[in-house]
Image (cartoon, helix red, strand yellow):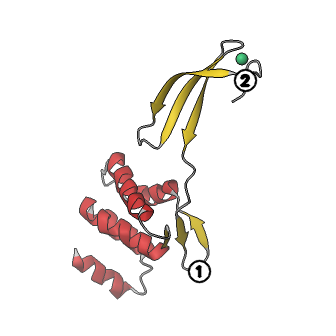
Amino acid sequence: MRCQQCGSTESKVVDSRPSEDGRQIRRRRECEHCGGRFSTLESLIERPLIVIKRDKSSEPFNREKLLRGLLTATVKRDVPLAVLEELISNVEAELRDLPRREVSSKKLGDMVLARLRDVDDVAYIRFASVYKDFKDVEEFQDALKVM
Ligand SMILES: [Zn+2]
């Protein structure tokens, strides 16, 4: 890794620390030429998790996108961000265990809903209304009754 100050490629690692989720290593390096310090981030190159959408197109699983959806569903519901982060990590872990590492958006929605039900009732309904693509009002009300 080239030093930003002098351009030398010789550096030594002075500190290594795993990130909070344990999936990256942050290394503090020192340039052997000028002594400048900089950090690098090392992560495993993984096969991506793929989400197959309703129209059959696919996209990589995106934590941020899912988190945005969950934040919208939990507006004014006082659900800690850490709980949502954990929910997503949980879903992600389950996805990684799938043999083909791909999932339909519907199945993904169901996986999230199954967990969200235990977190917050209102958030569950809000999220379900987006993901389940309710055909009519009755269907939506049926979902409400289950609660
Ligand atoms: Zn340097």
Q: Position of residue 118 (x, y in %)?
A: 24, 62
Residue 126 at least partly seen: no
What amino acid is found at the position of numbered circle 2 in the picture? Gln
Q: Nearer the viewer, residue 32 or 21?
A: 32
What amino acid is found at the position of numbered circle 1 in the picture? Asp
Secondary structure under tag 1 reads: loop
Q: Position of residue 141 (x, y in %)?
A: 30, 82
Q: Position of residue 44 (x, y in %)?
A: 54, 47
- The C terminus, quarter of image: bottom left
Q: In the rendered image, which quarter is residue 88 located in?
A: bottom left
**Residue found at the very far top of the displayed protein:** 34
Q: Are marks 1 and 2 in contact (CB under 8 Å)?
A: no
Is 86 on the left or on the right of 135, as rendered? left
Picture residue at 39% right of the left edge, 54% below the top: 89
Numbered label tally: 2
| Crowd band around label 2 with a 10 angstrom C-alpha radius: few (<14), some (14–19), many (20+) | few
Tag 1 residue: 55
Residue 18 vertical position relative to residue 144 in the rendered view, above or below? above
Q: Position of residue 52 (x, y in %)?
A: 54, 74
Tag 2 residue: 4
Q: Nearer the viewer, residue 72 or 33?
A: 33
Picture residue at 65% right of the left edge, 21% below the top: 11
Q: Is mark 2 within 8 Å of ligand 1?
A: yes
Is 67 on the left or on the right of 123, as rendered? right
Secondary structure under tag 2 reads: loop
Residue 103 vertical position relative to residue 9 in the rendered view, above or below? below
Is 110 on the left or on the right of 100, as rendered? left
Q: In the rendered image, which quarter is residue 31 located in?
A: top right
Give the quadrant of ligand 1.
top right
